[in-house]
Image (spheres, grey):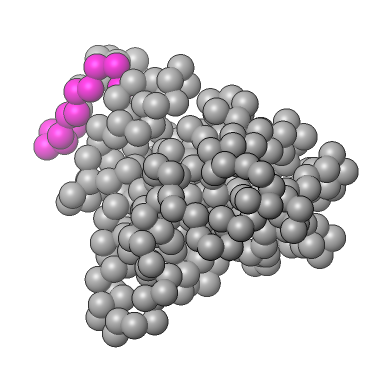
Amino acid sequence: MTSGGAGRTVRDRCSEPGAASAPDGCQVLDLPGGTVLPGLVDAHVHLCADGTAGTLDRIGEPGQDAIAAVIEQSLQRHLAAGVTTVRDLGTAVSPCSTGAHACGAHGLADGVDGIEHCSFLTDKGPSQSEQDLARLAEAGTAVCPTPGMAGTPEPTPNAAALLAKLGMTFEQVMEMNKRRVGQMHAAGVRVVAGSDGGIAAAKPHGLLPVSVAFLVEGGVSTVAALASATALAAAACGLGDRKGRLRAGYDADLLVVDGDPVADIGALARPAAVFAGGRRPAGAA
């Protein structure tokens, strides 16, 4: 890594392990069996929400100092999980030029750059057709389905009513959503990873490794799932020329995990070291 402005970038120099000694003064991190990845990119978070029950109802209550403290704590939780870049859909403007924050499919023909959630939800349940997926794939629209949860949440009254109407349990809906997202990817839709972190106790900040594992459980390959949380997510956020890849000239945002996430996606949830801009943040692995 080399210094550059306020941060550091990756230098175009590689060598075989042990073929070159580290420069004087550099810390050497020895992690046998570890894997170096680009820092993860979470394309859908709500930094002003604290990831506890009822947080969305309380967002407008605290003052600016309290909100700033929540945002700082949220960022620290993302860093601890290996996420070095987030797109905030709470209080900040998205880096994407055009987007649709939607549950259904009404944004398909509107020329949007990205669609959030994209559940194709109707009053009769999800309605995702091959034609809809083909249109999304042809348009190159970035879809962030925000999958994955920490445990099983207590359904809201509206959600409970819909589950009763569909005659399904929450667990059955989750399995259906896994299949839906897998079908999106198989149809060529540009799926990017996002956690919806912060909006509830089942959606805490730092959830992205769970979201990526959800994609794999739905049939997406581990390589493609990792790309959805690195290069593809960075591109969707307008940062594809700086982040999401281990490449010369890119920001030195790095994640080292214990194991090989290509062979075992669970390794993504075992961060051994995190670097943001070439520096190891306090409180991160």
How far across and how far down the image is residue 16, in percent? 34, 15
Residue 138 sits above or below residue 273 on the image = below
Residue 164 sits above or below residue 52 on the image = above
How far across and how far down the image is residue 254, in percent? 35, 39
Residue at position x 75%, y 36% from top?
Answer: 188
* Residue 259 highlighted magenta (yes or no): no
Say if residue 109 shows up in the picture. Answer: yes
The answer to whether residue 181 is left or right of residue 64 is right
Q: Which residues are magenta?
A: 23-34
Residue at position x 55%, y 49% from top?
Answer: 146
Dominant secondary structure (helix, strand or loop) of the stretch shown in magenta: loop
Residue at position x 54%, y 43% from top?
Answer: 170
The answer to whether residue 99 is left or right of residue 127 is left
Figure quadrant of the C terminus: top left
Figure quadrant of the N terminus: top left
Residue at position x 29%, y 74% from top?
Answer: 68
Toward which corner of the image does residue 10 lie, by quadrant? Answer: top left
Residue 102 sits above or below residue 148 on the image = below
The answer to which of 278 and 57 lies nearer the viewer is 57
